[in-house]
Amino acid sequence: MWRRHRAAIFLGLLGLVAGGLFGLILGVVAGLAVDRMRSDLGSGLSAEREVSRAGVRGDVVSASRRGAAFSVAAVVLSAKLAKVDGRVAAEEIRAFRRVFYVPPEELDMVARLFDGARRDALGYRAYSRELGRIFAGEPELLGELLEGLERIARADGEVSVAERKFLDRVRADFGIAERAIN
């Protein structure tokens, strides 16, 4: 998945550095367009066929955009969760690496995205709300992401009050029933 979205991740990183959260969003959108053009040219698939294969309730979102949105949001949510209690611990970074597989050739790009996102914990709700909207029909996928985030929160010892609030808000944005976090 990471390889298919190189431009989205790269341009998202550039946007994050240049313009913060808004720059990240613009960069990802521009990168998705580039990735989509490459995909369409390389595979011979028409945009109409791709969109019709990946319809989502309400809006129609391509499979490529869904994958990129999920990948970027998973990295950003992980980084912001690690930061929400004040500092990003090495244990949390190791937990991220255990939870999410990143191909070796994409490690630098993902590390830059994680580092940019962990500067502060602000803005994470935009990502969790968007994922909740795009993947509303796939609660298992959202549940797996939430479980991964919980593992990151537990990595440095106890789950802090700030981390619990973060996870509760993400859970609500995902439309997942409340459960206790240990």
Image (tube, grey):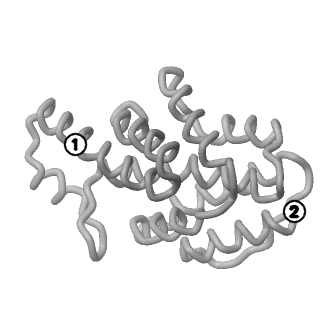
For the point 67% across and 48% down, the residue is 118
Residue 48's image quarter?
Answer: bottom left
Q: Identify the residue position indicated by label 2 in the image.
A: 160
Q: Is residue 76 left or right of residue 25?
A: right
The kind of secondary structure element at disc 2 is loop
**10 versus 104 height, above or below:** below
Q: Is residue 139 left or right of residue 133?
A: right
The kind of secondary structure element at disc 1 is helix
Position of residue 138 measured from the top left corner of the image (x, y, whole percent): 44, 65
Direction right: furthest residue:
157
Which residue type carries mark 2? Ser
Q: Residues within 10 Å of mark 2 (few under 14, many from 20)?
A: some
- Between 59 and 57, the one lying in front of the other is 59
Residue 179's image quarter?
Answer: bottom right
Which of disc 1 and disc 2 is earlier in sequence? Answer: 1
Q: Identify the residue position indicated by label 1 in the image.
A: 36
